[in-house]
Amino acid sequence: SGFRWLDAEEIAALEPALAGRFRQALFFPQEAHLDPRRALSALRQGLAARGAAFAGEDMADPGFALTVDCTGASRIGGIDGLRGVRGEMAYLQTDEVTLSRPVRMLHPRIPLYIVPRGGGLFMCGATMIESDDAGPITTRSLMELLNAAYSLHPAFAEARLVETGTGVRPAFTDNLPRAWRRENRITVNGLYRHGFLLSPAMAGEVAALALGEETFRGDIR
């Protein structure tokens, strides 16, 4: 829901770089995007300025009245039902393509998404592999990402590959996050691919648990 169909002319009006390349597209006008690296840095700085303390897993007894465990994939094997889903990405740099919003392409082999980061940088990703291996990107995945990017726009063939990365997403069987409390420890985990999308709702769940409420009754929009 929340989308409308675009024809070729409407695609060209929204993203001139894609003019003449696609006949149809789905447009989600309410969709937004952010740079998670910048967002996390700003969030951490803001929390630290308000007195929040950050601790690693090595602190068995940090001495706080309440501890929130949000250590993600590092808890795989320690939480029942939590598994790893590997994701891979590549950063490309080119001045020949300009996009104003994330573009997702339903490719036959890999549903590529390309997110503009500014300065000619584009983050390309989409892989979902049932594995908790956090090693370097595989040759196959990189080739598929680059081939899909080239299919979106030929100029990506001359783009510079400036970075590759991998990560393990923690996920439960239903791919939905959970939060629970045992004594003075709150655990929140299993955000899978939802990340910032469900973070406000999960923060509300954690706050409700911290305050001794049964459920979170806030309005997440």
Image (cartoon, grey):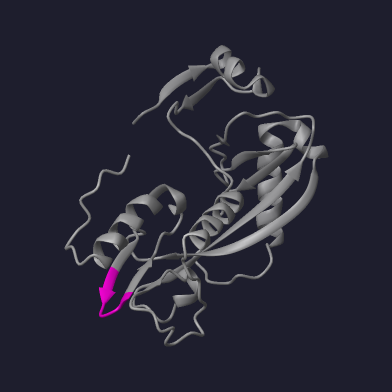
Relative to residue 133, is residue 5 drawn left or right?
left
Could you say which is closer to the camera, residue 49 or residue 4?
49
User: What is the x, y in percent for residue 60?
Assistant: 44, 87
- Point out the residue furthest to the front here: 50
> Would you say residue 20 is visible in this rendering?
no
Res 165 → quadrant: bottom right
What is the x, y in percent for residue 3? 40, 26
Q: Image point 40% across, 81% down: which residue?
A: 78
Residue 98 part of the magenta-drawn span: no
On the image, the x and y values in percent for residue 47 come to: 48, 59
Residue 215 sits above or below residue 21 on the image:
below
- Whole-percent x, y for residue 22 in the image: 60, 23
Q: Is residue 9 above or below residue 141?
A: above
Instruction: Tell me what residue is drawn at x 75 percent, y 32 percent.
Output: 154
Q: Which residues are magenta?
A: 180-185
Q: Is residue 150 visible?
A: yes
Q: How many marks?
A: 0
Pick the front one: 12 or 189: 189
* Quadrant holding the N terminus: top left
Q: Is residue 161 left or right of residue 85?
A: right
Q: Residue at x 30, y 60 (%)?
A: 207
Identify the image quadrant of residue 220.
Answer: top left
Which residue sits furthest bottom?
Answer: 60
Q: Nearer the viewer, residue 72 or 166?
A: 72
- Is residue 190 rendered to the left or right of residue 86? left
